[in-house]
Image (cartoon, rainbow, N blue to C red):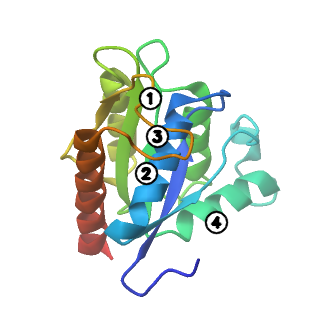
Amino acid sequence: MTPSPDTFTVALIVGSVSQPSLNRRLADALAALAPDEGLELRDVPIGELPFFGAHMESKADYPEAGRVFKRAVDSADGLLLVTPEYNRSITGVLKNAIDWASRPEGESSFPGRPTAVIGASAGDISTAVAQNHLKAILMSQGAQVLGEPEAYIKYEDGLIDDEGQVTDASTREFLQEFLRSFRSLIERFA
């Protein structure tokens, strides 16, 4: 699908490599809702990135997986991170992806980038703690992070069907509003 001129592209990063993944289901549901809100979500996988180390930071030693990842992030108008919560924080694989996107020195993908954070969990506070950690990391890197609405999705069986459709009308409306707010943020920085 070629986006229309009124459509913004968004690099979609899911902070879970688990199968199955509640947050992958949420990301797929968001991707299905996004075109109606003027967004095209492009999945940017992070599971194959090597663990970041300073020894890989020079341009000569920067691995191809890191280059591919950074091109995908840098070519998008915005960045949407869908995070689970592990031990009251973000996953190691997501933190590793952030480290890659912030390097090499002086070439971070984050400064000025419109960015939104969302996550799902079966717990009562959903992914609130992980999202707060993630937002702090992103803001420290200069990302323009969407402040409202905050999106802590309490996942219950059947919330998203096998076709990626949100079955609860109020949740679907909330997610549409979240995407509209994110689009407005992207427009401000486009």
Q: Is residue 6 left or right of residue 94?
A: left
Residue type at mark 2 is Leu
Residue 34 point in image, percent of width and height: 40, 62
Element on which disc 4 rests: helix
Q: Is residue 120 above or below residue 151?
A: above
Q: How many residues crowd mark 3 within 10 Å: few (<14), some (14–19), many (20+)?
A: many
Q: Nearer the viewer, residue 109 or 179?
A: 179
Q: What residue is shown with label 2?
A: 30
Cβ atoms under marks 1 and 4 closer than 8 Å: no
Disc 1/disc 3 C-alpha distance (Å): 12 Å
Of badges 1 and 4, nearer the viewer stands: 1
Q: Residues within 10 Å of mark 1 (few under 14, many from 20)?
A: few
Q: Residue at x 50, y 68 (%)?
A: 76
Mark nearest the camera among 1 and 3 is 1
Amino acid type for the residue under numbered disc 3: Leu
For disc 3, the marked residue is 26
Between the C-alphas of marks 3 and 2, the distance is: 6 Å
Using the image, tell me which numbered label, if any, was put on residue 158: 1
Between the C-alphas of marks 2 and 1, the distance is 16 Å
Mark 3 or mark 1, which is nearer the start of the sequence? 3
Mark 4: give few (<14), some (14-19) or many (20+) Cα within 10 Å. Answer: few
Disc 3 is placed on an element classified as helix
The answer to whether one can see residue 146 in this image is: no
Cα distance between the residues tagged 2 and 4: 22 Å
Dot 2 crowding, Cα within 10 Å, few <14, some 14–19, many 20+: many
Q: On screen, 80 above or below 123?
A: below
Residue drawn at the location 45% of the way across and 85% of the way down = 4
Q: Secondary structure at mark 1?
A: loop
Residue sitting at x 26%, y 43%: 169
Residue 14 occupies which quadrant of the picture? top right
- Numbered mark located on residue 71 in the image: 4
Q: Can you tell which of label 2 and label 1 is closer to the viewer?
A: 1
